[in-house]
Image: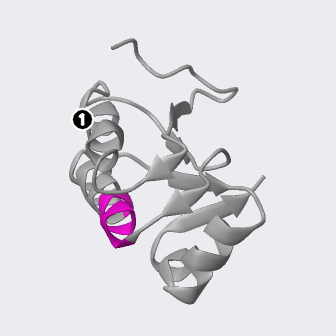
Amino acid sequence: MSPPPERPGGAARIGTPRELDLTTSGVLLARVRALDPGAGPVEIDLREVEFIDSIGLRALIEADRILAERSVRPRILVAAEGPVQRLLQLTLLDHTLDVRAE
């Protein structure tokens, strides 16, 4: 697996599957775990996600926990306006996690 591309400012951006659920949440977590422990800021890109279930939400929380243990700051979820961003708002994860609309 190749390392995530760097964004301007040195942030690594991790892509996600179109559906973040029981069958694909492991892909996201594997990408997060594969990051260099000394990585700088990390963005998890949710712009292409069309569906998230409770397991997918749990994977986002777990990814944030893994990055926090590595003292990676900031940890940002990038979500397009739409159903995914609305789900993050309904579950109040937009208050717990750093979510930015893009």
Mark 1 is on which residue type? Arg
Instruction: Identify the residue at horizontal 51%, vertical 86% (top origin).
Output: 92
Q: How far across and down, in percent of the image, does residue 25 sit?
A: 32, 49
Q: Nearer the viewer, residue 32 or 69?
A: 32
Q: How many marks?
A: 1
Q: Where on the picture, by quarter, is residue 51?
A: bottom right
Q: Residues within 10 Å of mark 1 (few under 14, many from 20)?
A: few
Q: In the image, is residue 39 part of the stretch drawn in magenta?
A: no
Residue 32 drawn above or below residue 76: above
Q: Nearer the viewer, residue 42 or 79?
A: 79
Instruction: Identify the residue at horizontal 61%, vertical 55% (top origin).
Output: 50
Q: How far across and down, in percent of the image, does residue 31 sit?
A: 33, 32
Left/right placement of residue 69 relative to residue 11 reads left
Q: In the image, is residue 59 part of the stretch drawn in magenta?
A: yes
Residue 51 drawn above or below residue 45: below
Q: How far across and down, in percent of the image, does residue 53 sit?
A: 41, 68
Q: Nearer the viewer, residue 71 or 63?
A: 63
Residue at numbered disc 1: 33
Give the colouring mode of the picture: one colour
Query: Is label 1 in a helix, a strand or a loop?
Result: helix
Q: Nearer the viewer, residue 8 or 97?
A: 97
Query: In this orientation, does residue 74 appear?
Result: no
Q: In the rendered structure, which segment of residues is drawn in magenta?
A: 54-60
Residue 53 drawn above or below residue 28: below
Q: How far across and down, in percent of the image, does residue 33 sit?
A: 24, 35
Instruction: Identify the residue at horizontal 43%, vertical 53% (top origin).
Output: 20
Left/right placement of residue 89 relative to residue 36 reads right
